[in-house]
């Protein structure tokens, strides 16, 4: 029977029929709202992610991010969640260029269970629950129009696992699959997560795709996914569409 493979805390819970070790980190969707004005409200939804960004006053942005996913296959069962809050500053340049700088913190939890062959047709239950915190800072840089948006982001994340409860695994299995509690919970794990986001549609509604690369920074190795891709829908409530210009002095989109 193939071993259980599950990513925890800050990304999608992923169970694969291949692989021999636990994956302890996978990047979640990077928040890249690219706000242009005071009062603008943007939201995005994908199969596992919900994100909201709002500018309550000129140059200030607030973020709320949520993630949940569950998985079942045969005797395997896993689920994971993440909730984050953040805030920062945003501004514009060169007519349609947008810059943002955000920071935030979140809490995540993931639970996984499986059954392994114990011989003689019997099975033994194995599983674990991981809980942790993630703090992040990130700049975003993009180009925003009523028809498309293109943005680049670099999220720097510090991940601290506060608990790892493991059941049913033998000591050699815990060591092989990186499930020794002290080895996971003692360090603060640092990651660089560059991402590219592309949106296309018209004004208030756009489809989007985001690809994120995950790079571990220094210290001991931690099993993690190398990259992730998210596809979803973005909604934007704003008034700047009425005065949009491709270049200074050009006709607006509504002319």
Image: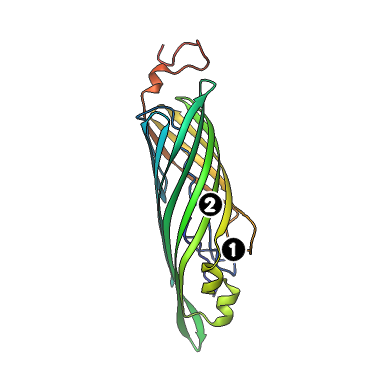
Give the numbered dot on residue 157.
Answer: 2
**Residue 157 appears at what percent x and percent y?**
53, 52
Q: Quadrant of the N terminus?
A: bottom right
Q: Are marks 2 and 1 in contact (CB under 8 Å)?
A: no
Q: Would you name the residue on which mark 1 appears?
A: 223
The tag earlier along the polypeptide, 2 or 1, is 2
Bin the neighbour count of mark 1 within 10 Å (Cα to Cα): few under 14, some 14-19, many 20 and up. Answer: some
Q: Quadrant of the C terminus?
A: top left
**Residue 102 appears at what percent x and percent y?**
47, 41
Element marked by disc 1: loop
Instruction: Calculate the distance from the C-alpha at mark 2 to the C-alpha at mark 1.
Output: 16 Å
**Residue 178 appears at what percent x and percent y?**
57, 71
Q: Residue at x 51, y 73 (%)?
A: 181
Let me know if residue 34 appears in the view.
no
Q: Residue at x 51, y 17 (%)?
A: 246
Give the color scheme: rainbow, by chain, secondary structure or one colour: rainbow
**Residue 15 appears at what percent x and percent y?**
50, 63
**Looking at the image, residue 69 lies above or below residue 231:** below
Element marked by disc 2: strand
Q: Nearer the viewer, residue 167 or 228?
A: 167
Q: How many marks?
A: 2
Give the numbered dot on residue 149.
Answer: none
Q: Nearer the viewer, residue 48 or 36?
A: 36
Bin the neighbour count of mark 2 within 10 Å (Cα to Cα): few under 14, some 14-19, many 20 and up. Answer: many
Q: Residue furthest bottom?
A: 120
**Looking at the image, residue 231 lies above or below residue 69:** above
Q: Nearer the viewer, mark 2 or mark 1?
A: 2
Let me know if residue 185 appears in the view.
yes
């Amino acid at each position: 029977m193939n071993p259980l493979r599950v990513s925890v805390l800050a990304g999608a819970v992923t169970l694969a029929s291949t692989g021999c070790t636990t994956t302890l980190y996978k990047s979640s969707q990077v928040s890249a709202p690219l706000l242009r004005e005071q009062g603008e409200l943007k939201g995005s939804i994908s199969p596992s992610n919900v994100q909201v960004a709002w500018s309550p006053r000129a140059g200030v942005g607030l973020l709320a991010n949520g993630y949940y996913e569950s998985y079942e296959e045969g005797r395997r069962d896993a689920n994971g969640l993440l909730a984050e809050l953040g805030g920062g500053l945003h501004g514009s340049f060169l007519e349609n260029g947008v810059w943002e700088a955000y920071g935030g913190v979140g809490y995540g939890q993931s639970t996984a269970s499986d059954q392994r062959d114990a011989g003689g047709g019997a099975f033994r239950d194995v599983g674990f629950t991981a809980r942790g915190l993630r703090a992040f800072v990130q700049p975003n840089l993009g180009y925003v129009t009523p028809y498309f948006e293109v943005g680049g982001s670099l999220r720097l994340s510090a991940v601290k696992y506060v608990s790892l409860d493991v059941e049913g695994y033998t000591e050699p299995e815990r060591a092989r699959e990186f499930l020794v509690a002290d080895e996971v919970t003692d360090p603060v794990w640092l990651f660089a997560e560059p991402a590219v986001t592309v949106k296309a549609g018209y004004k208030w509604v756009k489809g989007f795709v985001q690809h994120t690369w995950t790079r571990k920074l220094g210290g001991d190795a931690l099993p993690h996914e190398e990259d992730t891709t998210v596809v979803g829908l973005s909604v934007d409530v704003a008034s700047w569409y009425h005065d949009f210009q491709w270049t200074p002095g050009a006709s607006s989109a509504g002319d």
